[in-house]
Image (cartoon, helix red, strand yellow):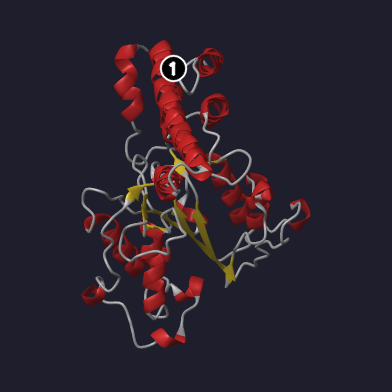
Amino acid sequence: METMFIKGFPRRKCQCEQFFSVILGNKTALTGGSGKVVDSSPDDRIFIYYADHGSPGFLGMPSGEDLIAKDLINVLKKKHEAKSYKSMVFYVEACESESMFEGILPSNFNIYAVTAANPSESSWGTYCPGDYPIIPPEFDTCLGDLFSISWMEDSNIHNLRKETLNQQYQMVRRRTSVDNLDLSSHVMQYGNMTVEKDFVFSYLGTNPKNDNFAPSTDNFEVSPNTSNVVSQHDASLIHFWLKFHKASKDSPKKTEAHKELLGELFQRKHIDKSINEIITILMGHENVPKMLKSVQPVGKPLVDDWNCLKMLFNTFKKYCGTTTRSRYEMKYSGVFANMCNAGVDMKHAIATIIEVCTATSPTS
């Protein structure tokens, strides 16, 4: 059993190419960090857990360009062609994360992917300040994600030699969606569905203390419900607000926190205004709602031309993106997928994005 961690990589070094090199077991391509890679054999089972910001077609990276779905699938294809694993389980915690696999992950790769959300919805932060269970006062942010705490807490209490991946999926799906009807996401699964019959132990190991606690339909509710969740697109606002709220009145920290909070709000306003103007210029004002909401039919990839999406979104991120880790601009990558699917002229689109984003100040 091979469990993969990108551990020991400083943020500035944790980029797409590093991630790909780790998956492919290519030590010579790594620069800095721990040097660990997935040096697996045909008999190995691999488990990958990925958590970051997400958007239609993309996963966030700590540094450099975001990870686009097509590039990830190409790397998984190389891993499959190298015959260097028996099966792979890929858990993804990110907004709109199903878009990383829908219509593009072949079932013959022997990869089973589970995502926190469908292609058009946010994932949700939980264990937030002011919620139960009470978190330490020094933390000004949510400490978990609903999908992630669900599978992790389930793994912590069950005998994973007797729990299948499908049983865990059903529990996680129920806790993430049904128990939070208004504020929830739909946990999805893709790839080779025969892998779901495997026991979780084959990928995560197990705790001997849980040997007498096998999963059943009667103990789905063992993991406690979470009373409050926050959209990951808005989670950073909690941090900035609490930092301002907790600072002493008339102190330099209060002034600085107020500046940071206003800066985040102004940047969001700038991004919202810019995307609407870009759509209006390129597609017409009457098509703004369609471009903001339209998604591909079930089973089809997010976009037909992945290079078009990558070019347009990276341009938007460069000229309109936030300067904080909130990555608010990512929520609009689906707009550019819709534009590419509609046959937008790429040169005209890039010029328009640059013009709109640079002509309007974030503080206007």
Residue 9 position (above or below residue 100): below
Residue 194, image x, y percentages:
40, 63
Q: Is residue 324 left or right of residue 265?
A: right
Towards the viewer: 269 or 288? 269
Towards the viewer: 326 or 158? 326
The answer to whether residue 83 shows anywhere in this view is yes
* Residue at image coords 38%, 70%: 153
| Local secondary structure at mark 1 | helix
The answer to whether residue 102 shows anywhere in this view is no
Which quadrant is home to the N terminus?
Answer: bottom right
Residue 242, image x, y percentages:
41, 48
Q: How many marks are shown on the rendered structure?
A: 1
Q: Which residue lies furthest to the right in this view?
A: 28
| CA neighbours of label 1 inside 10 A, class few (<14), some (14 to 19), many (20+) | many
Q: In this view, does 189 lie to the left or right of 14?
A: left
According to the picture, the residue beneath numbered tag 1 turns out to be 278
Which quadrant is home to the C terminus?
Answer: top left
* Residue at image coords 32%, 40%: 298
Towards the viewer: 177 or 262? 262
